């Protein structure tokens, strides 16, 4: 459950992402900053999805179980959006790969 961005903020976010992607492609890939970027994107995506699931659970409790009509609904957990969680795991794995690549690049620079 990703939030749909609209308006001016989404354009500036897209432009910032485009600049970051262009920077990554134009320069050396294995730098610590890229590992941090992938980790940050993965964590933000996980927090957004987890908060959406939490809010869906609270709304389900508020309107289902505690309904004013006296007829309570059975509580159900929100659906898990597997592609988003797969993307989170992929981003975190890429962060590890880029971190290891940056460490190897630094090690390579120190060898004669």
Image (cartoon, helix red, strand yellow):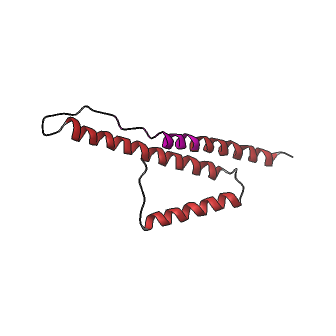
Specify the principal SS of the magenta part.
helix
Please name the residue shown 43% across and 68% down the image: 8
Percent position (x, y) of residue 12? Answer: 49, 66
| 55 with respect to 38 (left or right) | left
Q: Which residue is nearer to you in this view: 34 or 60?
A: 60
> How many badges with numbers are in the image?
0
| 59 with respect to 24 (left or right) | left
Please name the residue shown 33% across and 44% down the image: 55
The answer to if 93 sits in the magenta stretch is: no
Please identify the residue farthest to the bottom as the structure is shown.
8
Percent position (x, y) of residue 24? Answer: 66, 57
Q: Which residue is nearer to you in this view: 4 or 28?
A: 4
Please identify the residue farthest to the right as the structure is shown.
112
Percent position (x, y) of residue 86? Answer: 53, 40
Percent position (x, y) of residue 23? Answer: 65, 61
Above/below status of 5 relative to 98: below
Span of residues in magenta: 77-90
Above/below status of 76 relative to 5: above
Q: Which residue is nearer to you in this view: 62 or 30?
A: 62
Please identify the residue farthest to the top as the structure is shown.
74
Please identify the residue farthest to the left as the structure is shown.
69
The answer to if 81 sits in the magenta stretch is: yes
Q: Quadrant of residue 87?
A: top right
Please name the residue shown 48% across and 47% down the image: 45
């Amino acid at each position: 459950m990703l939030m749909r961005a609209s308006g001016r903020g989404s354009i500036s976010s897209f432009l910032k992402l485009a600049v970051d992607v262009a920077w990554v492609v134009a320069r050396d890939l294995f730098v610590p900053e890229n590992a941090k970027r992938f980790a940050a994107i993965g964590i933000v995506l996980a927090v957004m999805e987890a908060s959406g699931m939490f809010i869906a659970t609270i709304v389900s409790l508020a309107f289902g179980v505690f309904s004013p009509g006296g007829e309570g609904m059975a509580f159900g957990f929100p659906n898990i959006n597997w592609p988003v969680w797969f993307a989170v795991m992929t981003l975190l794995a890429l962060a590890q790969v880029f971190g290891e690549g940056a460490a190897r690049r630094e090690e390579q620079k120190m060898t004669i």
